[in-house]
Image (cartoon, rainbow, N blue to C red):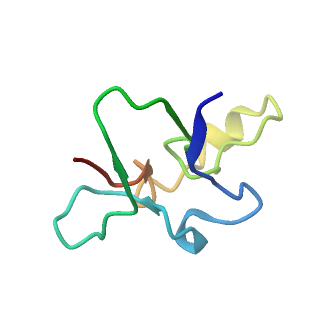
Amino acid sequence: MADKLIKIDFSKSPEEQECVHNRWHPDIPMIAWVKPGDDFVVECMDWTGGQIDNNDSADDVRDVDLTKVHYLSGPRYTR
């Protein structure tokens, strides 16, 4: 089974996660190295950072704070 390279605590906000960011920027530190051909698992938050609940309510989509979106897990670098 593949190793879990990045683990997310879904009970925390994106801002509380060390491995979550919302942009690609050279000042964001690398959190893992991988080699071509490596098998690994990366957990990710949804694009809203958990603002949309699993409650079938359209209000969640209507009320998304678009200044807090596009969450990414990483960055990872290849050797």
Q: Quarter of the image for the N terminus: give it.
A: top right
Q: Residue at x 23, y 56 (%)?
A: 24
The front one of 29 and 40 is: 40
Q: Position of residue 28 (x, y in %)?
A: 28, 69
Q: Position of residue 8 (x, y in %)?
A: 64, 54
The front one of 11 and 76 is: 76
Q: Residue at x 56, y 52 (%)?
A: 49
Q: Farthest right residue?
A: 55
Residue 11 located left or right of residue 31: right
Q: Residue at x 59, y 73 (%)?
A: 16
Q: Position of residue 19 (x, y in %)?
A: 48, 62
Compared to 74, does 57 lie above or below? above
Q: What is the count of numbered marks?
A: 0
Compared to 30, does 49 lie above or below? above
Residue 73 located left or right of residue 60: left
Q: Is residue 43 visible?
A: no
Compared to 3, does 73 lie above or below? below
Residue 34 located left or right of residue 60: left
Q: Quadrant of residue 61?
A: top right
Q: Quadrant of residue 31?
A: bottom left
Compared to 28, does 68 lie above or below? above
